[in-house]
Image: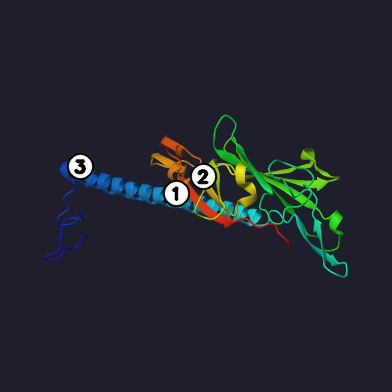
Amino acid sequence: MTRRYQGEASSSFPTGNCRGVTLVELIVYMVVSIFVITFSLELITSLLTNMEQERRVVDIQHDGSDIINMLLRDVGSMGFKYYLGTSNGTDFVRYRIPGTWTGADVYETAPDPLPADSAASFFVEKAVGGDVLDSLTFFRGLMETSLEPADQPAERVSYFVNGGKLKRVLTSFVDGSYDAAQGDTVVIHDNTVGLVFTFSPDYERWYADPSGQRDEIRYMRISLLIRSTREGSVQTNRDFILARAADLEDLDTDMVYSVESDRHLYRKYEATVEVPSNGIL
């Protein structure tokens, strides 16, 4: 027998407001959710794009700085054709390091007599089919103190751009000549699009082609244009001037590299180095 008390509910269902969600409310919730999800996705996409852009900028800045520093370090060590050796009792005897003299042309042996002072231990070459002087070759002695002057080792170092790659070739001076077959070629950078060398005897007059006064050159300016490995979302449309005709004595038109509708990131770097005098050390 079931006993009921006054005030006790006679039903097991809740007596509060138990109204369900209407179709209109459901649609509103869905629309709001879509807006929130869309905004979140756009925010995440924007953050990822900015991170990728910053990574490309950092990568290309590091690459450009490393390349310029390597070129400056190598160029700063060129030459050293002769130096003071042992004393013969009255004065010092000058010895020439073999293979480090180029003169007006490329010589395997130095002219006689030796010049008193010169910075001609380098030469440049024009790009195939173009006018840009983008290939630099120079010579340097290694100055091994344990060897006799006539046996001092020397190296030929070349920088050039080929197929968008910046390459460095190191060749040793062996048995009176440079053996190209023994040259050590290293790819420095995979996305180099421009490399220009200009030269000056006094930091006031600059030349694109120093062949007529190579023995007077004291300064070398390096202009480098590289691009990022990965593409981005922003297109590049601009001209990069690697050498201005107004700044050079022997250039009629600017050396320009044009970029159109390219999603790669481009950066230009420039540095000036004093060419060693190659005199007596």
The residue carrying mark 3 is 27
- Specify which label sits upstream in the sequence, 1 or 3: 3
Residue 57, percent from left and from top: 46, 51
Q: The N terminus lies in which quarter of the figure?
A: bottom left
| Circle 1 SS class | helix
| Of residues 42 and 173, the one drawn nearer to the viewer in this rendering | 173
Is 176 situated left or right of 74 in this image? right
Residue 14, percent from left and from top: 19, 56
The residue carrying mark 2 is 226
C-alpha span from label 3 to label 2: 53 Å
| Of residues 15 and 130, the one drawn nearer to the viewer in this rendering | 130
Question: Mark 3: few, some, or many residues within 10 Å (few <14, many ≥20)?
Answer: few
Q: Give me the disc on residue 17.
A: none
Question: Mark 2: few, some, or many residues within 10 Å (few <14, many ≥20)?
Answer: many
C-alpha span from label 1 to label 2: 18 Å
Residue 230, percent from left and from top: 49, 42
| Circle 3 SS class | helix
Q: Which amino acid does label 1 sit on?
A: Glu
In the image, residue 5 above or below residue 34: below
- Specify which label sits upstream in the sequence, 1 or 2: 1
Residue 171, percent from left and from top: 75, 45
